[in-house]
Image (spheres, helix red, strand yellow):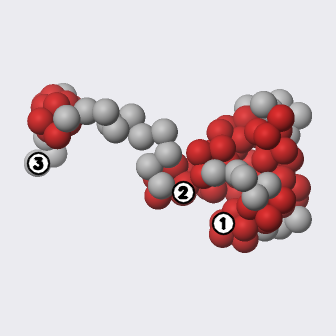
Amino acid sequence: MKEKKRVYEALVDGAMEGLTDQALYDFVKARCPKATSKKIVRASLLALTDPHLRDRNILDVIYALAIKHRLDDGVLDDGEDEEPEERAQSSQAANQNMPQLS
């Protein structure tokens, strides 16, 4: 928890300084060299749920960083343990529930 708190503080400090995207990520990595993308995403989620943090610009920057690293690096990938056949079946089931556009 201590590491996540330091990453959280680095995220907020960097965002308050006006850093965004890769510059913010580099700032966090400089302050917390052991921080992984997974830890940064989790610290970002902690920041987004903090009731004391109300500046929309800061929240938007942190949210964008979390989404980018969640998607780019496959952090917290839910389909990681599925077999390819299971993944195809779940994908087909999801498509069946979607309305068809004409």
Residue 71: x %, y % from top left: 46, 52
Residue 91 figure quarter? top left
Say what amino acid the circle numbered 2 marks: Lys
Which element is circle 1 on? Answer: helix
Neighbor class of circle 1 (other Cα within 10 Å; few <14, some 14-19, many 20+) is: some
Residue denoted by label 1: 21
34 vs 48: above or below: below
Q: Is residue 20 left or right of residue 78?
A: right
Residue corresponding to mark 3: 102
Q: Which numbered tag is attached to residue 6?
A: none
Q: Does residue 85 show up?
A: yes
Report the disc number at residue 68: 2
The Cα–Cα distance between marks 1 and 2, rounded to whole angstroms, is 8 Å
Across and down, in percent, residue 17 comes to: 88, 65
Q: Amino acid at mark 3?
A: Ser
Vertical relation: 21 (above or below) 53: below
Q: Residues within 10 Å of mark 2 (few under 14, many from 20)?
A: some
- At horizontal 80% and vertical 64% (from top left) the residue drawn is 30
Q: CA distance from mark 3 to mark 2?
A: 32 Å
- 60 left or right of 100 in image: right
**Furthest residue toward front:** 34
> Alpha carbon of mark 3 to alpha carbon of mark 1: how far?
38 Å
Q: Are marks 3 and 2 in contact (CB under 8 Å)?
A: no
Q: Amino acid at mark 1?
A: Asp
Q: Are marks 1 and 2 in contact (CB under 8 Å)?
A: yes
Q: Residue 43: horizontal and vertical position, in percent?
A: 71, 41
Q: Quadrant of residue 65?
A: bottom right
Residue 78 versus residue 64 in the image, above or below: above
Residue 19 in picture, x, y percent from top left: 78, 67
Answer with mark 3 or mark 1, whichever residue precedes in sequence: 1
